[in-house]
Amino acid sequence: MPTQHVVTQGECLSSIAKSYGFPDFRTIYDDPANADFKKLRPNPNLIYPGDVLVIPDVNAPTFTLATGKVHGFVVKRPKASLSLQAEVMTSHFYRLVVGDRTFSGRTDGSAPIEHPIPPDAATGRIELWPATSGNEKAQAGLFGWDLQLGALDPVDELSGVQSRLANLGYYNGPVDGAQNDDLSLAVARFQGDEKLAVSGDIDDDTRDALRQRHDGA
């Protein structure tokens, strides 16, 4: 029988799907019972604590098999990927650590850094350093950030605006969903860089520009 799930901070659709035994989060996201949720959250990568999902029944498949023979089965495992855009002007090496997995590579900022990660991963860390000859295996990155996976709120929420401005280097205040002077200054600086009317107020144009620059959509 279908059940309801209330989203908590740090959850994403992939982690929720895994916890209920679904290999693909779209089984939940595309279920007709979640039509209103899908309309509210058109980007399935951005959901919000308090959102309510209907979890459909897991339909266990039935197989008819001949005895005395060996049969093979393919089991689909939940998948998730992490995409990060580093705003760098020159080539950098990077090291990304998520759980017990470590990824390394090189980026010049022209394309996102993308790697598959466990669907229920909650934290990680990325480090970057200038890509100079002989520096490929640096022990410590010049720049490093701790990552809270699944914790980004929608840009429609004030906390979502704060998080995005913080990630882009404009805002250093608390991500608490409350208006403050530091946030107004950060918004004004962002508006100036994006050639918007500078008011310090979070209007629709500012949210759209922030969504485009941070989320790429």
Image (cartoon, rainbow, N blue to C red):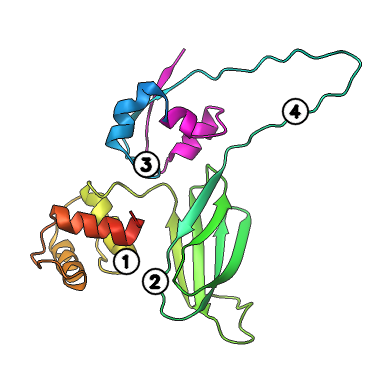
Which residue corresponds to mark 2?
A: 87
Q: CA distance from mark 3 to mark 1?
A: 21 Å
Please name the amino acid that badge 3 sits on.
Gln
Q: Is residue 66 above or below residue 40?
A: above
Corner quadrant of residue 60:
top right
Query: Considering the numbered disc 2 on the image, is that residue within a helix, a strand or a loop?
Result: loop
Q: CA distance from mark 4 to mark 3?
A: 36 Å
Labelled pair 1, 2 in contact (Cβ < 8 Å)? yes
Q: Is residue 33 above or below residue 111?
A: above
Residue range (magenta): 1-29
Instruction: Classify 10 Å Cα crowding around label 3: few (below 14), some (14-19), many (20 and above).
Output: some
**Percent x, y of residue 132:** 57, 86
Sequence order check, earlier mark of 4 and 1: 4
Q: Residue at x 45, y 28 (%)?
A: 28
Sequence order check, earlier mark of 1 and 2: 2
Q: Is residue 184 above or below residue 130?
A: above
Q: CA distance from mark 1 to mark 2?
A: 8 Å
Residue 95 drawn in magenta = no
Which residue corresponds to mark 1?
A: 168
Camera-side mark, 3 or 1: 1
Labelled pair 4, 3 in contact (Cβ < 8 Å)? no
Instruction: Classify 10 Å Cα crowding around label 1: few (below 14), some (14-19), many (20 and above).
Output: some
Query: Considering the numbered disc 1 on the image, is that residue within a helix, a strand or a loop?
Result: loop
Q: Residue at x 80, y 14 (%)?
A: 65
Please name the amino acid that badge 4 sits on.
Phe
- 197 horizontally vs 99: left or right: left
Query: Considering the numbered disc 3 on the image, is that residue within a helix, a strand or a loop?
Result: loop
Which residue corresponds to mark 4?
A: 73
**Percent x, y of residue 189:** 18, 71
- 119 horizontally vs 158: left or right: right
Which residue corresponds to mark 3?
A: 9
